[in-house]
């Protein structure tokens, strides 16, 4: 599910492009100067999502980080796209 600042929630089924939709939405929001958090159901999906889209974000000149349970508070940065899991 995805939620926007207008409280719109959408559900995308398996194979319908959740990772791509999240990356495009995150990039747009980050280009507008917002800090973005992409939360997945587990750490593997967070890592995989970042890996899949790293080149896209890099091309746009955007900073992206993986946040895990072991990440320190100082690793969370403003104006960055953060991938993490709900448990992290």
Image (tube, grey):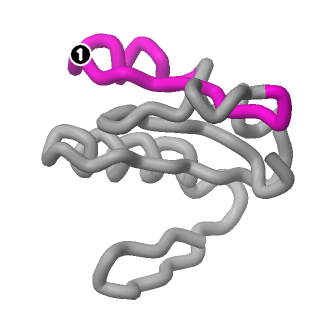
Q: Which residues are magenta?
A: 52-70
- x, y percentage for residue 59? 26, 13
Q: Where is residue 56, by image quadrant?
A: top left
- Name the residue: 51% across, 69% down: 2
User: Residue 74 sits in which quadrant?
Assistant: top right
Which residue does the numbered mark 1 point to in the structure image?
Answer: 61
Residue 57 higher or lower than 78, as above or below: above
Residue 18 position (above or below residue 51): below
Residue 82 position within the rendered picture, expressed as x and y whole percent measured from the top left: 53, 37
Give whichever of 24, 7 is nearer the camera: 7
Image-based side of 74 in relation to 84, left or right: left
In this rendering, position of residue 21 left or right of residue 14 = left
Q: Nearer the viewer, residue 88 or 44?
A: 88
Extreme-left residue of the structure: 32
Q: Is residue 53 magenta?
A: yes
Q: Which quadrant: the N terminus?
A: bottom right
Q: Is residue 37 above or below residue 69?
A: below
Q: Residue at x 55, y 44 (%)?
A: 19
Q: Secondary structure at mark 1?
A: loop
Indicate the position of residue 18 as horizontal and vertical percent values: 56, 53
**Any magenta on residue 68?**
yes
């Amino acid at each position: 599910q995805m939620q926007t600042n207008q409280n719109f929630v959408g559900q995308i089924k398996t194979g319908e492009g959740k990772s791509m939709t999240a990356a495009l939405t995150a990039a747009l929001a980050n280009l507008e100067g917002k800090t973005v958090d992409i939360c997945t159901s587990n750490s593997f999906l967070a890592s995989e999502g970042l890996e899949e889209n790293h080149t896209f974000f890099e091309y746009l000149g955007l900073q992206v980080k993986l946040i895990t349970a072991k990440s320190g508070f100082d690793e969370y940065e403003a104006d960055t796209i953060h991938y993490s899991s709900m448990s992290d």
